[in-house]
Amino acid sequence: MRIRRILAAVIATTALAGLGLTGAATATAQGAPSYVTPSECKQGGGTPDLADNLCKGGTHNGEKID
């Protein structure tokens, strides 16, 4: 019985730790908006729109231009 309790506690701790790491990764991914330079926007296949300060198209689509 004692081994089962310890095993259950270890499994529960591992599961909760995994959820904590997942939450931390999500918070980081949704943090402050990223900025790219006009040349990074072009290298990613986009077009820098300096009127709106946004990269349009490519891998940096919608990111702000610094």
Image (spheres, grey):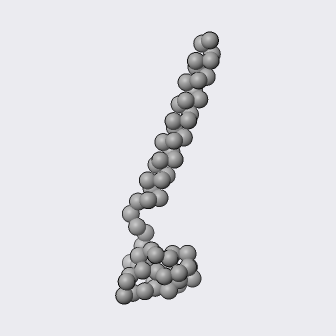
- Residue 4: x percent and y percent? 62, 18
Image coordinates of residue 46 in percent, x first then y, are 53, 83
Q: Which quarter of the rendered picture does the C terminus lie within? A: bottom left
Residue at image position (43%, 69%) is 34
Relative vertical location of residue 32 with respect to residue 60 in this rendering, above or below: above
Residue 1 in percent (x, y) is at 62, 12
Quarter residue 15 falls in: top right
Q: Is 49 on the left-hand or right-hand side of 3?
A: left
The answer to whether residue 39 shows anywhere in this view is: no
The tally of labels here is 0
- Residue located 53% across and 31% down the image: 13
Say above or below: 60 vs 10: below
- Residue 38 higher or lower than 28, as above or below: below
- Which residue is at 51% across, 75% downward? 60
| Res 52 → quadrant | bottom left
Q: Residue at x 55, y 29 (%)?
A: 12
Could one spot residue 2 in this view of the protein? yes
User: With 10 as the anchor, is 55 left or right in this view?
Assistant: left
Residue at the top extreme? 1
Q: Is residue 51 left or right of residue 20?
A: left
